Image (tube, rainbow, N blue to C red):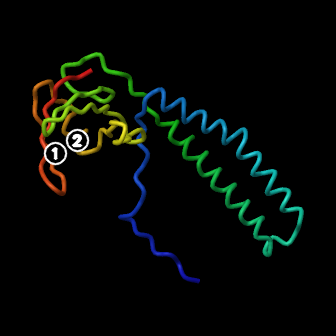
């Protein structure tokens, strides 16, 4: 039997425990749905297929067991995340950029608005960037009027902070 070689440099990053209350409630609903709907349905399906006997030749049974394992894995991930979650509250101090702020910046003559949140909520297409993203790291702690630089693979981009809310 051959043992698989693991690429430790390719391990998936850990989920960011920082999230808004809105995202937390959304994930709680997903967990509740998995526990009350998806897992019981998968268990019933596995039981039904197990009654047919001969597990080694029963492809449908193997597929159903795989789905159940996947559901259980997601439940474990959510429960683990919830044990260490840190809710991001919108900061009151607007003097410098903090996690939870909406930041208006100017770059190349264009005005853009970004919200700085945890990586579990980032969606650059919606203007939500991770605190760990290069731009998020550059903006954190800076104030209105300051200019930050971000080096991309193509060029160096400068952003001037116009407003913090």
Q: Are marks 1 and 2 in contact (CB under 8 Å)?
A: yes
Rendered residue at 72%/38% (across/down): 36
- Among numbered discs 1 and 2, the one appearing first in the sequence: 2
User: Residue drawn at (42%, 41%), measured in percent from left and top?
Assistant: 120
Residue farthest front in this picture: 109
Give me the C-alpha separation between circle 1 and circle 2: 6 Å
Q: x%, y% of residue 37?
A: 73, 41
Judging depth in this view, the residue of 3 and 18 nearest the camera is 18
Count the labels in the image: 2
> Dot 2: what SS?
helix
- Name the one closer to the observer, 144 or 140: 144
Q: Which residue is mark 2?
A: 135
Direction from residue 97 to residue 50 in the image, left or right: right
Q: Secondary structure at mark 1?
A: strand
Residue 150: numbered disc: 1
Give the side of residue 153 with respect to residue 56, left or right: left
Screen quadrant of the C terminus: top left
- Residue situated in front as seen by the camera: 55 or 160: 160
Please indicate whether residue 103 sits to the left or right of residue 100 in the image.
left
Q: Which percent across, then down, holds residue 21?
A: 47, 26
Judged left or right of residue 69, residue 160 is left
Image quadrant where one finds the N terminus: bottom right
Q: Residues within 10 Å of mark 2 (few under 14, many from 20)?
A: many
Name which residue lies at 14% across and 24% down.
144
Q: Position of residue 72 (x, y in %)?
A: 65, 50
x, y percent for residue 66: 68, 61
């Amino acid at each position: 039997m051959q043992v698989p070689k693991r690429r430790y440099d390719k391990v998936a990053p850990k989920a960011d425990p920082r999230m808004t209350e809105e995202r937390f409630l959304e994930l709680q609903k997903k967990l509740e749905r998995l526990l009350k709907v998806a897992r019981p349905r998968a268990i019933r399906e596995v039981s039904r297929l197990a009654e047919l006997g001969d597990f080694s030749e029963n492809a449908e049974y193997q597929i159903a067991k795989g789905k159940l394992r996947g559901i259980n894995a997601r439940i474990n991930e959510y429960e683990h995340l919830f044990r260490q979650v840190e809710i991001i509250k919108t900061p009151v101090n607007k003097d410098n950029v903090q996690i939870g702020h909406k930041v208006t910046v100017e770059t190349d003559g264009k005005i853009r608005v970004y919200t700085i949140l945890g990586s579990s909520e980032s969606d650059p297409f919606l203007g939500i960037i991770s605190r760990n993203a290069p731009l998020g790291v550059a903006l954190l702690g800076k104030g209105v009027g300051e200019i930050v630089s971000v080096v991309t693979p193509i060029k160096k981009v400068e952003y001037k902070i116009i407003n913090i809310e």
